[in-house]
Amino acid sequence: MALEISKIESTEFSYPIEDVGTDDGFNLVYEPGTTTERSLFGLRIHTYEGLTGEFVGGNSPGFAQINVIADYLIGKDPLKRERHWSEIKRGLRKYDRMGIGPIDIALWDLAGKHYGAPIHELLGTYRTRLPAYASSYHADRNGGLDSPMAYAQFAENCLNRGYDGFKIHGWGGSPEARDINREIETVHAVGDRVGDEMDLMLDPACEYETFGDALKVGRACDKQEFFWYEDPFRDGGLSQHAHRKLREQIDTPILQTEHVRGLEAHADFVVNDATDFVRADPEYDAGITGAMKIARMAEAFGLDTEIHSPGPAQRHCIAALRNANYYEMALLHPECENTQPPVYQNDYSDHIDSIDADGTVPVPDGEGLGVEYDWDYIEEHETGRRRYE
Ligand SMILES: [Mg+2]
């Protein structure tokens, strides 16, 4: 029986994150007494047959693109994901195509409900427990992650909780706030404390001013035998030439392509020897369809694909991949809650204590994404809505 899309609703809402503010730039950091309102979107794709595909997450630029593509989907068969992916990809060719992700994930959720199976089974299940690493907040100046020793202490705390990996997001926010020697001290402090027992990663999130700084910190990662070094400097994670040069001069594997959009652009990064690990994100990289294409491309080159950030769609992707090491539990801090929204009614959660004693999380086993969204919460916190029919 063919299905037909009748209506698409996108609901913008915001939720509070307590004791969190921003540094002098765009990073969320621990700030006692401050509340940050974070905006997300809830997407529902309805069919005349009564099935609804759902997804909650995303960002404003991505959801703005849904204005361009929603009318195309009305009246279409929601099961023809590959066809829609190709058409929408062309339709958004002038843009970064962030709008495909939420739509594609909701279509996979709908397909799972139609077939009565979790998404990881539709993709082909490789595993049902996913090893998680603890991914820290950026540094603050407010008594939280505010020194190399504080990072070392928090990494040990995460080790004791069962995490096998720890990732540092360091200092940032303004040129004055960045002290490359303190970054190097942090690499050594964490490495000396837990390096024998955890895989360690460093993600400056493109904060370093120069290639030279990226090189200096990379050499510290070499000494501490870091597992990967990610998006170090202000090229924005985009220069294939610079990252090939960086790889030639340090030993630590680098992880790029979080800020590169598109299957072909990811492949070009790999072919030009500009990364060791490949980054993909179902929200950013054109959905589960797009992220899995990137992961299969990397598999063909013998490389691993590390899926970015936590979430149900991310879990289904990793569950269907051999060539992936970790699930990113982000963002974690010793004093404040993580940044994930309180929108789940079932036992799904992405918090510091959501791992088992082995440091793993489960993949949801219900139909589709396998989560029950709390639409009452989302609508109570609604800040805007678009309806297409
Ligand atoms: Mg990153």
Image (spheres, rainbow, N blue to C red):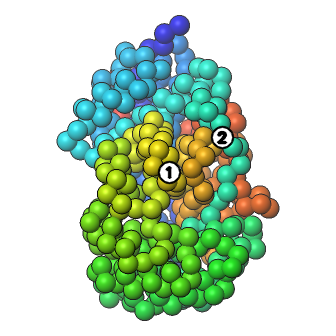
Q: Find out whether the residues at labels 1 and 2 contact each other: C-beta distance under 8 Å.
A: no
Residue 377 placed where, x, y %? 57, 44
In the displayed structure, 76 sits above or below 66; it is above
Describe the element under mark 2 as helix, strand or loop. Answer: loop
Instruction: Give the numbered dot on residue 264.
Output: none
Q: Which residue is mark 2?
A: 126
Q: In percent of the image, x 36 and y 26: which residue is there? A: 84
How far, Cα to Cα, is label 1 from label 2? Answer: 17 Å
**Which residue type carries mark 1?**
Gly
Q: In the rendered image, which quarter is residue 43 located in? A: top left
Residue 123 placed where, x, y %? 57, 33
Beta carbon of the mark 1 residue lies under 8 A of ligand 1: no
Work out whether residue 149 can be spotted. yes
Work out whether residue 387 can be spotted. no
Q: Residue furthest top?
A: 1
Describe the element under mark 1 as helix, strand or loop. Answer: loop
The answer to which of marks 1 and 2 sits earlier in the sequence is 2
Q: Nearer the viewer, mark 1 or mark 2?
A: 1
Q: In the rendered image, which quarter is residue 237 located in? A: bottom left
**Which residue type carries mark 2?**
Tyr
Residue 332 placed where, x, y %? 59, 68
Neighbourhood count class around disc 1 (C-alpha, 10 Å): few under 14, some 14–19, many 20 upward:
few
In the displayed structure, 355 sits above or below 120; it is below
Q: In percent of the image, x 23 and y 38: which residue is there? A: 93
Q: Residue furthest left?
A: 94
In the displayed structure, 254 sits above or below 108; it is below
Q: In percent of the image, x 68 and y 33: which residue is there? A: 366
Residue 359 placed where, x, y %? 73, 61
Q: Which residue is mark 1?
A: 302
Q: Which quadrant of the rendered structure holds the C terminus? A: top left
